[in-house]
Image: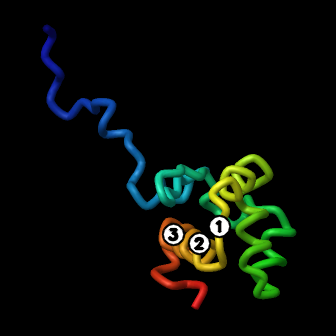
C-alpha cells in the first residue's frame, strides 16, 4: 500500500461541516406509533397551502398537507382521534427542531 505524502488531503478532509450538511437535508423521517412518515425538512420546500394552514392555525390541515395524500391515508387508517393528531403534530415539530408541544 503506498504511503500518503505528508500534508496530502484525503477524502475525509473534503467533508462539509455538519451545519452545512444539515442545511442541505431534504427529507426527515417522523415515527409515530410504529409508522414512519417522511416529510420535507425545510419549510422552504413545503407547498404554499401547508404554510398558509400553519399560519392560520389549522394544524390538522397543515399536517395533512405536509404528509401528502398517501401518508395521510396511512395515518387515517389508524382511526385517529384529536389527541392522535396532536401527538403526530408534536412528533413532526420535534423532528423539525421546533421543540416539544409546539402546537400548544
State which quadrant residue 19 falls in. bottom left
Q: Mark 2 points at which residue?
A: 84
Q: Is residue 67 left or right of residue 34?
A: right
Q: Is residue 13 above or below residue 5?
A: below
Q: In which quarter of the image is the C terminus?
A: bottom right
Q: How far apart are marks 1 and 2 (CA)?
A: 5 Å
Q: Is residue 48 left or right of residue 54?
A: right
Residue 45 tag number: none
SS of the residue under disc 2: helix
Q: Quadrant of the N terminus?
A: top left
Q: Name the residue under label 3.
A: 91
| Protein image colouring | rainbow
Mark 1, other Cα within 10 Å: few <14 / some 14–19 / many ≥20: few
Most distant residue in the bottom direction: 104
Q: Tell us which disc is closer to us: 1 or 3.
A: 1
Q: Name the residue under label 1.
A: 80
State which quadrant residue 5 falls in. top left
Amino acid at each position: 500500500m503506498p504511503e500518503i505524502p505528508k500534508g496530502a488531503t484525503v477524502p475525509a478532509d473534503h467533508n462539509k461541516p455538519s451545519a452545512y450538511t444539515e442545511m442541505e437535508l431534504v427529507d426527515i423521517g417522523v415515527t409515530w406509533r410504529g409508522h414512519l412518515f417522511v416529510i420535507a425538512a425545510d419549510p422552504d420546500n413545503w407547498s404554499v397551502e401547508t404554510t398558509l394552514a400553519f399560519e392560520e392555525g389549522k394544524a390538522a390541515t397543515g399536517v395533512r398537507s405536509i404528509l401528502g395524500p398517501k401518508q395521510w391515508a396511512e395515518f387515517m387508517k389508524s382511526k385517529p382521534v384529536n389527541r392522535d393528531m396532536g401527538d403526530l403534530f408534536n412528533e413532526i415539530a420535534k423532528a423539525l427542531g421546533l421543540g416539544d408541544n409546539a402546537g400548544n
